[in-house]
Amino acid sequence: MVKKILIAAAVLVVVLVGAAVAAPFLIPTGAIVQRVTAEVEARTGRKLVIEGDVGLDLLPDLAVRVDGARFANAPWSDAGDMARIGQLQVELALWPLLSGDVQVRRFVLEEPVIRLERNADGAANWQINAGGQTSSGTLTPAAPPTTGPAPAAPAGTSSSGGGLSGLSLGEVKIANGTVVYTDAVTGTDERLDDVNLTIAAPDLDSRLTLAGDARWRDQALTVSAEAGQARAVLEGGQTPVSLDLALGEGKIHLAGDAVLGTSPGFTGTAGLSLPDLRSIIAAAAPGPALPEGVATRLNLDGRIDATAARIALTDMKLGIDDIEATGSLSADMSGARPKIKAGLTTGDLVLDRYLAGRAAAGDGATGPEGTARSGAGWSDEPIDLSALGLLDADVTLNATSVSLGDTKLGATELRLALDGRRARIEVPKTALYGGSGSATIGLDGRATPASMSVKATFSGLDMLPLLKASADFDRLEGKGRLEADLTARGNSQRALIGSLGGKGLFEFTDGAIRGINIAALIRDPASALRGETTDVRKTDFARLAGTYTIDKGILTNRDAEMQAPLLRVGGQGRVDLPARRVDYRIEPKAVANLEGQGGQTGLAGVLVPVLVQGPWDNLSFRPDLEGTVKRTLEDPDAARKTLDDVRSGNFGDALKGLLGR
């Protein structure tokens, strides 16, 4: 009996081996290919074309090899096939398959080219419903990454649609592939080359792992991901996931719960580290190189809540170069441009490295912080405002202090609104050089040349360090109040200054004009003119105020008034901002009054005009003797009466010392 059983078993083995050997020759593969392609078209509405040879083996596993295939795109696409495959290899465990258990031994796509598209109406070519109807539902650019392991989908689909009891993934790979993604809604056009991807899952209810690498814009890209349940990934359900993505030296880590279907979403934690941010920016947005030292690193950590159209970060810690901030940030990608909303708090905000045109050390044309020195004039370097069109934004920032070159601000609140190449910067409150104030700056880059507006009010300012930092001007001391309402148009520093227009006012108290002693000029004009006076070249004042207008860069003032002990000084003239020159006339009066601020201004006095002229980094001061003589000759009686009034006043002795005998 045993002998017969063994003989029967031997015969069965021989038959099976013979069948396996003969199957590739006896089974009509052409008919099978025809049946498969017809079934695919019936179910998807798109053609599957087998272009090369088809190989079939039955033992030890069911193995199919297809040399060349292509899958049609959505009817609305004119970009060619959705997928072209150099070679497809599928191996399934034969005996488990008979009981409905799908065990994928090997699933390999060699040299596939996969094209993912979304048209202007939001329809995506990877959305295919049963019965051949292509979904017209919308999906955002965040969805394609979840379709990256598309080769596994057929097995998953068979599992659910065909009622198979299980699925296990052995070697599932994409080798040397290309993925192209085009989105007509956002204008996105991306490409991944040299794609190598491996996916594995023991069964549908176990975890799924993914690992691979590719190249994006000449940057090395690697990915490692894990999902808690393979079935949830294939069926678009919710599952715990973790993702580690590396691009060059940059790294992204996500951990949380994800939905990976047609409406993807994620909630969890996020970490981002880009130690070489410049290379990422250069790859993502090719163009002029960033100034050295700018955008060297970016770090980010926080809670994340993301959908296909929106990403929100809370409990966020953000680091950009040397700047550290906390707060929240959200990005809405549903429109034509991303829209960013953020609320950030930071400590000492040092912005020196971001000064445009920062020069290398030792460059004589610019100062240590890259600002143009007074002798160098205004810059003709074009101001690039193209970044205004990259996104829309609503950002608020609170900083303990702000440093920009020599300009130092204290506690500052700032709001940036960016909309359609228009920017509005509001500083509702800031501390500046011992004072405080507010400002609003507008930039409009929609037309050429661009336009700019400034409205500002400041009080209590320390004028000497402020003017030194902003204009390299060191001739004025005191506390100041400034108001300005200005506009300009141009695409360079020189053009903006040359078109500057508007109005404003100034008021300085308890200060001094450096470089001139008006009292010395009155006392001995001839010696002052010859440079023989030994008096300190400084004129103290209690108040100096006036208004001004600006037209095409020319600042005009006609009502300046200075109040000082024994002096009342009026002034009028102009400052040529484009040429950086001053042409101003000071009209001092010696008065019989020791009061300064708030004192009388109508007392008779001795008029000795002073001319202030020249480039503002090398001003000359000289008495206008010609004007004085002319005025005296025109009205000698008034001049004589003025002298009599001064000498008969209560402060005659003091004035004698001031005017000379």
Image (spheres, rainbow, N blue to C red):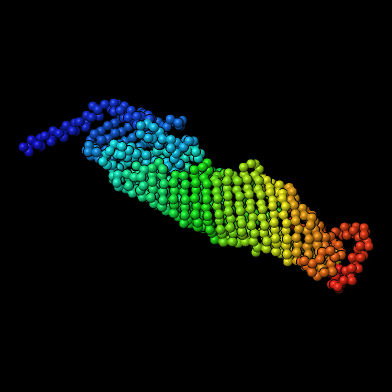
Tell me, yes or no, if residue 41 can be seen here. Answer: yes
Residue shown at 82% from the left, 62% from the top = 588
Tell me, yes or no, if residue 105 can be seen here. Answer: no
Residue shown at 73% from the left, 66% from the top = 510
Q: Quadrant of the N terminus?
A: top left
| 161 over 529 or under it: above or below | above
Q: Nearer the viewer, residue 602 or 158?
A: 602
Q: Position of residue 357 (x, y in %)?
A: 62, 51
Q: Quadrant of residue 470?
A: bottom right
Q: Is residue 508 left or right of residue 228?
A: right
Q: Position of residue 540 (x, y in %)?
A: 76, 66
**Number of marks present in the image shown:** 0
Please, which residue is most extreme toward the left here? Answer: 1
Residue shown at 86% from the left, 68% from the top = 659
Q: Nearer the viewer, residue 602 or 420?
A: 602
Q: Quadrant of the C terminus?
A: bottom right
Q: Nearer the viewer, residue 101 or 498?
A: 101
Q: Nearer the viewer, residue 127 or 36?
A: 127
| 524 over 354 or under it: above or below | below
Q: Position of residue 105 (x, y in %)?
A: 28, 40
Q: Is residue 296 left or right of residue 72?
A: right
| 468 over 204 or under it: above or below | below
Residue shown at 88% from the left, 69% from the top = 646
Q: Position of residue 492 (x, y in %)?
A: 66, 47
